[in-house]
Image (cartoon, rainbow, N blue to C red):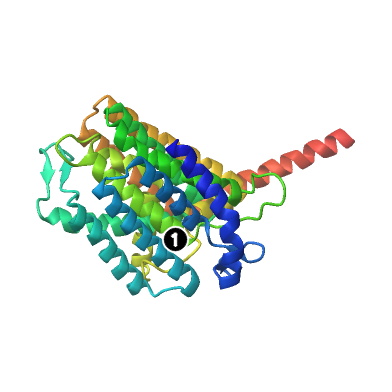
Amino acid sequence: MEFLVALLTTLIAIPILKPLAVKVGLVDVPNARKHHDGAVPLIGGIAIFLGTLSATLIAFPTDATVRLFLLSAALIVFLGMLDDKEDLPVRTRIVAQILIGGILVYGAGHYIHDLGNLLFLGDVDLGVFGTFFTIVAVIAAINAFNMTDGIDGLAGSLALNSFTAIAVLFYLSGNTNQAMLPVIIAFSVVPFLLFNLSLLPGKARKIFMGDAGSMFIGLSVIWMLTLGTQGENPSFRPVTALWLIAIPLMDMVAIVFRRLKKGQSPFKPDRDHLHHIFMRAGMTPKGALAIISIISIVLAAVGVVCDYYQVSESVMFCAFLVLFVVYNYSMMHVWKLLKFVRVIQRRNRIRRLRNIRRIRS
């Protein structure tokens, strides 16, 4: 029932919000960095939040912690709407994200302090410093998903993968009640993807998620991970969380590292994200979406399986570090990879032309 409410609310909200967005100027227009056709309404995130809100109030009518989450989510969506419309300064966004993260951490009393046994030396417990760590994690998650929102369907697909994996882990641990919230959000994301990827019949016009959506997803993911990994009876281990958000996390850290190395602001927009690199290699946006989504599913599945079979936390952490080092090295030397790919593509084109000439002759 709740899942159907989430899906239908989002589906109904989108056509209602679209003309309102155009009227108030909440649209994304093409520029040197954004290559799309015409002004596209930035209402996907608002619709996803409305779907989540309606279904969550039905599923958890008296849960104070969930109410606090919805309050924080409403604030982050409002912040995203302002950023979509006015392009807020980076400092303003970060300060607001810190305050909103603080509402969850200090209001609900849930924060990340137990990191598990990461380096074969026993459990790492941050104690009171966990509150600071959690707020930093909130900012990181929000901006990680925000940075992935560069091609149609990517942020939504990565979110769908993460929420599904989190729900599976909750379910496997016996916490079926907690599994409901990530599933509700996942059902709210589905109608957005249908519009964003133009999968609906007829003349359903494209919409974008906007910063409101990517910020809401980032906040929701880190909150679900916090609830799942902390407390007396956690549903899964902290190191597993890294695998559930591997693509957004690695892409953000690698991008920030490269920008700082160049002496640039870590928040400076560019076209060096993973999806841009795939497209520079000759892939279409949908091809890049498919490949990145599959990689995300595989990595999340690795996390779920390793957690289920209780693979050593230290082994999982070291494996993730190796994965990240390989990823970062590849991104730093991507021009060599692109050159190799182009050489292969050129050889294949020449081979096809020769075959065509041979057939014609």
Q: Is residue 254 visible?
A: no
Query: Left or right of 223: which side holds 205?
Result: right
Q: Is residue 159 above or below residue 17?
A: above
Query: Left or right of 62: which side holds 130?
Result: left
According to the image, label 1 marks what residue?
Answer: 212
Q: Residue at x 41, y 37 (%)?
A: 164
Please state the horizontal and vertical placement of residue 349, each as a whole percent of the image. 71, 44
Which of these two is toward me, 309 or 284? 309
- Give the position of the N terminus as an image quadrant: top left
Q: Is residue 37 visible?
A: yes
Please state the horizontal and vertical placement of residue 204, each as a whole percent of the image. 67, 52
Say how many tags the image has. Answer: 1
- Give the position of the C terminus as an image quadrant: top right
Which of these two is toward me, 298 or 74? 74
- Give the SS element for disc 1: helix
Which of these two is toward me, 109 or 274? 109
Please state the horizontal and vertical placement of residue 102, each as a whole percent of the image. 23, 61
Q: Residue at x 38, y 43 (%)?
A: 58
Task: Identify residue type, mark 1.
Answer: Ala
> Would you identify the image quadrant in which residue 229 lies?
top left
Q: Residue at x 37, y 68 (%)?
A: 262
Query: Left or right of 68: which side holds 152?
Result: right
Q: Residues within 10 Å of mark 1 (few under 14, many from 20)?
A: many
Q: Residue at x 43, y 40 (%)?
A: 161
Q: Is residue 134 above or below residue 56?
A: below
Q: Is residue 176 above or below residue 80?
A: above
